[in-house]
Amino acid sequence: MLQVVNMHRNPLGRTAGKKYLEQILQEENFGYNVKKALSKGEEALDNFYFLLKGNEMIGCCGMVVNEDMDEKSQKPWITSLHVNEEHRGNNYSEMLLNHVIHKAKLLGYESAYLAAGDMDYAPRPNWVKVKANTVSGSVYYRNLADPR
């Protein structure tokens, strides 16, 4: 059974969640946001979510609401979208992304931003490239009022 859980409500525990993020940091270049969130402690990880398949964490995605990347008006930032390689190709990343977007809507945000970093991000419908070649890679924008 698949479920998306918040960092603080992860039935596997917060420590397991942090360990998972640290592990994928070694495999992927999530860079600044995850490293900074991990260094700031529990509160900075409030908006990180994990995809569980049974008792295994197979993916994660976060939303940064308390940090600026380029401009103050550009919040929240979707960050650290990751699915373990052996589970890719099942639309799990879209499930995580939709969950985080839903949470952003519940928090009252009208738009969201995603920095692709070094990754080769293939944007989904309704995501518009607004900047290229920034420090954080290409930046994409989505109006949250748009349907999926």
Image: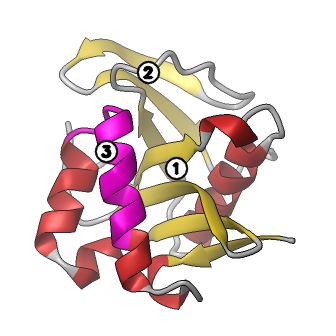
User: Percent from the top left, x then y, of residue 50?
Assistant: 57, 66
- The circle on residue 119 is 2
Residue topped by disc 3: 25
Q: Quadrant of residue 36?
A: bottom left
Mark yes or no: residue 68 visible: yes
* CA gap, disc 3 and disc 2: 13 Å
Please report the bounds of the magenta region as a residue range: 18-31
Front position among marks 3 and 2: 3
Foreground residue among 38 and 111: 38
* CA gap, disc 1 and disc 2: 22 Å
Foreground residue among 23 and 76: 23
Main SS, magenta region, reads helix
* CA gap, disc 3 and disc 1: 27 Å
* Amino acid type at image mark 2: Met
Quadrant position of the N terminus in the picture: bottom right
At horizontal 59% and vertical 61% (from top left) the residue drawn is 100
- The circle on residue 111 is 1
